[in-house]
Amino acid sequence: QLGGQSVKVKSERGWKISPRGFWTGVLNPAKMGRLMQKKYESGAATAYITRNRAINYLQISLPDFRRLCILKGVYPREPKNKKKANKGSTAPRTFYLMKDIQYLSHEPIINKFREFKVFVRKLKKAFAKAEHGRAQTLQENKPVYKLDHIVKERYPTFVDALRDLDDSLCLVFLFATFPQTKNIPGDFVRRCRHLSVEFMNFIVAARALRKVFLSIKGIYYQVELQGQEVTWLVPYSFGFNAKTCSDVDFRIMAHFVEFYITMLGFVNFKLYTSLGLHYPPKLTFEAKVKDDDEKNAYCLESEATGERLAALSASLASVVTQNVEEEEVELDEFEDSRAQEARQEEEKQKAFQKLFNGLKVFVSREVPREPVVFTIRSFGGEASWDKSVAMGATFDESDETITHQIVDRPNPERQYLSRYYVQPQWLFDCVNARMLLPVEDYFPGVVLPPHLSPFVEYKEGDYVPPEKETLLRRQQGLDTGATASEEAEVSEEEEEEDVEEEKEDEDDEMEDEDEEEEELQDEDGEEEADEEDKEDDDEEERAVKRTPVKRKQDEVQDTPPSSIKVKEGKLDYEDPSSKLSREEWEARKLAIMMIPKKRKRLFEKLSKRERRKKHEARTLQAKREEFEKSQKAKKKKQRLSND
């Protein structure tokens, strides 16, 4: 209060009082601004923005905002303090970074969205007025946008694109199996199928496939591209039922596919040019001749090349053909363990890429053709099928040079002695084992061995299935090569031996019982003579039942002093292994005691995790033992019933 009254004001050093009512100090603008600053004008309140505010900031609709965020790779964020970010409100909100929204505001696609809205409005008006000529002109000048610049922004290098290729392949292969519906454009389905076929043809040409796993969801593939491992999922070819997917928003998925189609086109172009292949892919001259012979019978001329590529049985044409083989340059060899290990690993990798070299496989019509042919061709094998199934077959079933035939029926009608008949799992197990497995375990009608996942890495203390242990021994060359059927025969022989031993034991027990009866009869006649001996035995038993200390005292009292002597003691040697384990346990216990309190909780969590892991391994081992016992019991019952 100024004018004739004292004023109490806080200065830099403290409070000052002016008796005349005037301020005698100097104002500090910085401090004045700090004191007068409003709440929620800095920090999390300005760093984050809600979705509604972002839509108003960009002046676009909610569907366009979702599409823009998906294309640009902008996702919602979770602030540390939601109340501060929401300016004191606790209502649920979706937050974005203000920097991301400002980044989106400079995107030229926003103008295309607005132009498309104007186009739709004009088109509706033209149809309403029956101006068909104007409507046709508008459709010819429909606004179109490209996503090339967005792909380059999100993936500056090719390796970045390969690292993010998993989701792209999963969604593209999924949409390639969909039919055309109201929410799924037919153009998307055709482009996805075309790109997926191109990618599989490159994998076959580069022999980049590494792992295959058949699961309930679909087939998992893993390839290696320029040192990057790419894993994706391909669904099984079942019928699509739109009613079961009523809760799926296909419009959102279509926005992702729109971007992934452009991205995968860039990736395919780069991959094909790295191997010196034509892009779009072209067939070799021999494949073209076969193509010309078959295209009139199966499809239109415009679809013949695409169908031939989708068959995966033809080789691709390269940009430059080299007839003269290049001479390999001899490099100087240095004695280095790392170089030797790298060389050995490279040789193993080359041998693995030629796993099916020399194999000629015929695929029966009941077997899914695409995954089987893709796996065979990726490792250098030849595959064919019946000509009535699809175009692209290279040889018939009657060919005598066929080495294997893939069947999925218990008893094939026609069988040739010059080939092996195996189930499809044999191919995938061979790929995961990196070696050709015995075909006896995969004959038609045989109970197949378990299909183990190649993506599981077993660590110390984990439960390892017996089949995995057998496979590891085979890979190391320690296994004798006995198949599962032979192992089953051996186990049956062991069971028969056990049964015979049990019978012999029963016979021995019967003989022992007879001998005991005879001894009892002899003892009845000698009871009177043994009464005195029994009394002596009772005294001895009482002496035995006494404690060792009392026995020693009695012995000392009974023995005369002249017989007491000092004997040389014997050293008690401890096993060095048990001593070492005891010392390690004591050292571990001391180390645990020395852990500070701050880190003791973390150590307890880790030890608890280890105990849980061991418990799970023991549980799985017990389940496996129970399963094997039940199987043995079933086999035993069957054998007894047959006998």
Image (cartoon, rainbow, N blue to C red):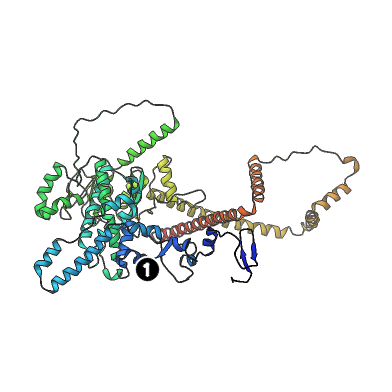
In the image, residue 199 above or below residue 521: above
Q: Is residue 515 left or right of residue 191?
A: right
Residue positioned most to the right: 561
Depth check, front residue: 587 or 261: 261
| Amino acid type at mark 1 | Asn
In the image, residue 473 above or below residue 524: above
Residue 453 drawn at (x, y percent):
39, 52
Depth check, front residue: 223 or 20: 20
- Residue 168 in view, yes or no: yes
Q: Which corner quadrant of the image does residue 3 belong to?
A: bottom right
**Residue depicted at 24% across the width and 46% down the height:** 269
Q: In which quarter of the image is the C terminus?
A: bottom left
Residue positioned most to the bottom: 128
Q: Quadrant of the N terminus?
A: bottom right
Depth check, front residue: 487 or 173: 173
Depth check, front residue: 622 or 326: 326
- Residue 430 in view, yes or no: no
So how many labels did they put on this image?
Answer: 1
Residue wearing tag 1: 52
Residue 332 drawn at (x, y percent):
37, 25
**Residue depicted at 74% across the width and 38% down the height:** 571
Q: Residues within 10 Å of mark 1 (few under 14, many from 20)?
A: few
Q: In this view, does 30 lie to the left or right of 581?
A: left
Residue 465 drawn at (x, y percent):
45, 52
Q: Is residue 285 left or right of residue 96?
A: left
Element type at mark 1 = helix
Residue 245 drawn at (x, y percent):
30, 68
**Residue depicted at 54% across the width and 54% down the height:** 614
